[in-house]
Image (cartoon, grey):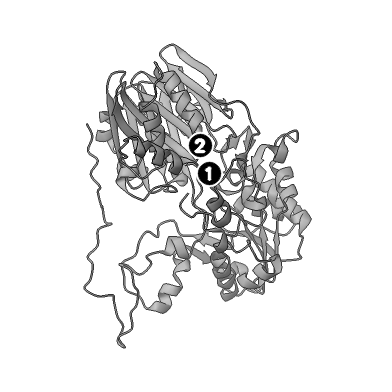
Amino acid sequence: MSDERLTFRSKRIVQADSPAIDASGNSLWTGQYYNEGVDNDYFDKLKEECGVFGVYGHSEASALSFYGLHALQHRGEESAGICTSDGKNFYYHRDMGLVKEVFDNERIKYLQGPAAIGHVRYSTSGASKLQNAQPLVFKYKGGDLAIATNGNIVNAPEIRAELEELGSIFQTTSDTEVVIHLIARSKQKNINDAVKEALQRIVGGFAFLILVNDRLFVAQDAHGLRPLAIGRLDGAYVFASETCAFETIGATYERDLRPGELLIIDEKGMTEDRFAPLQQRSLCAMEFIYFSRPDSDIDEINLHSARKRMGRQLAMEAFVDADIVTGVPDSSISAAIGFAEQTGIPYELGMIKNRYTGRTFIQPSQELRERGVKMKLSAVRKVVEGKRVVMIDDSIVRGTTSLRIVNMLREAGAKEVHVRISSPPYKNPCFYGIDTPDRKDLIAHERTVEEIRIAINADSLHFLTKEGLLEAIGRTPDEFNRGMCTACFDNNYPTALSEEMEAVGCGTC
């Protein structure tokens, strides 16, 4: 029913017979273009998870999904997809690339029906291929079924092996597909019970939108690790990973999904159910620190305001006398403003982010390639030159980016560079939908703060304490960890993990 060909649109390249070489016969680069791997090397930030968006009961469901996914684009830039239902038939399209590249007016018009689910993806489980782009769409004995997910299923390998022994043939390498098979193989007499049974088998952090011909299922894991909000628009129900998507389409926020909750939406309205008992809430702390857009709210807490409080708390914990405060664009700007307001040190735009880098196919020298960080981030020389600079960032992963940014500020004339991080040291990998390195590759795993300071060439370094972070976010003090998962900081995971996961960590979870 859809055209799912993988379009290359300026991504196609001609592979030379040999790598480019200079006059002395030395290789200039080993990949197909000179900055290949920049995203994974020069910028070792945590990768956004995924974003989901759903509509039920609106005549323009596909167009609303397009705008909603565009608002969630920061959560996944690898692929995008939308599946709609008119009550009898499915219409879907997905492709590799950004939302605005994958969809146009013709495709949106093709996606008929008042119900839709959409997805933007950054691969955490499963390879970066079109077959893993979501929503995943299948036919089974009960009709059509599509699923869109944000998160990761920890016990997917065990379930997959069990299902393959029983004869299941998987079409993708995505962990999400196990849910489809569990639903399809269920002995339950109706789809509602089959979905509930499938959800009870899986462990991890997830937010699901599951569409069948005549209804939509919405579910969040038992710990509430992955965010999902409910809204209303012109009588229709809308669902999104972040409330910024509601602002884009003009919807009204109603509430956040509850851990272990299962919603069933059909022509009669919305039925609230549960597939798991209420457990300790453990919403990912990195949503507040880094992932979510600053204009989004979680539990009615605005992200920009929370990050400003983190910056204020950081200033109280680790004041340093300096001339200017600057934040690493974009996620650290709010914390930098808070730090500046608390200390009275002026906030300045000391760094500029180039948003139009893309992939570059010119053939520079190796020296220029090593300076590839400046393609995406530049220091404002006249602002930092001769100044004692406080550089605010939200986290340090491997440390390579922090080193390059500190050196870039020094090259621009900064007299001192004091680094302040608006989160605790990131010591442990995530298994719930964030792409993180193995534990051994995290710079804070086995290094002291002083050792990290030396490694990134900073004059001083301080991380926000976990207690300061929780206080700044401000969720209810009546719950453990204020209802948040801080495993990446304290190794306290809310779900059971395999021995291999606990020992090594996984960069492709």
Residue 395's quadrant in the figure? bottom right
Q: 4 or 336, which lies in front? A: 4
Amino acid carrying mark 2 in the image: Phe
Give the residue at the far top of this rendering. Answer: 268
* Place of residue 275 in the rendered image (x, y in percent of width and height, measured from the top left): 53, 24
Neighbour tally class for label 2: few under 14, some 14-19, many 20 plus, Cα within 10 Å: many
Q: CA distance from mark 2 to mark 1?
A: 7 Å
* Place of residue 242 in the rendered image (x, y in percent of width and height, measured from the top left): 52, 36
User: Please, what secondary structure does the residue beneath circle 1 have?
Assistant: loop
Say whether residue 238 is visible: no
Vertical position of residue 288 compared to residue 218: above or below: below
Q: 481 or 383, which lies in front? A: 481
Left or right of 8 in this view: 81: right
Confirm or deny contact between disc 2 and disc 1 (CB under 8 A).
yes
Give the residue at the far bottom of this rendering. Answer: 24
Residue 162's quadrant in the figure? top left
Q: Which residue is denoted by mark 1 in the rendering?
A: 432
Say whether residue 53 is visible: yes
Amino acid carrying mark 1 in the image: Tyr
Vertical position of residue 23 compared to residue 344: above or below: below
Give the residue at the far front of this rendering. Answer: 165
The earlier-in-sequence mark between 2 and 1 is: 2
Neighbour tally class for label 1: few under 14, some 14-19, many 20 plus, Cα within 10 Å: many
Left or right of 361 in this view: 424: right
Quarter that holds the N terminus: top left
Left or right of 244 in this view: 385: right
* Place of residue 122 in the rendered image (x, y in percent of width and height, measured from the top left): 42, 47
Q: Which residue is denoted by mark 2 in the rendering?
A: 206
Q: Residue at x 36, y 27 (%)?
A: 185
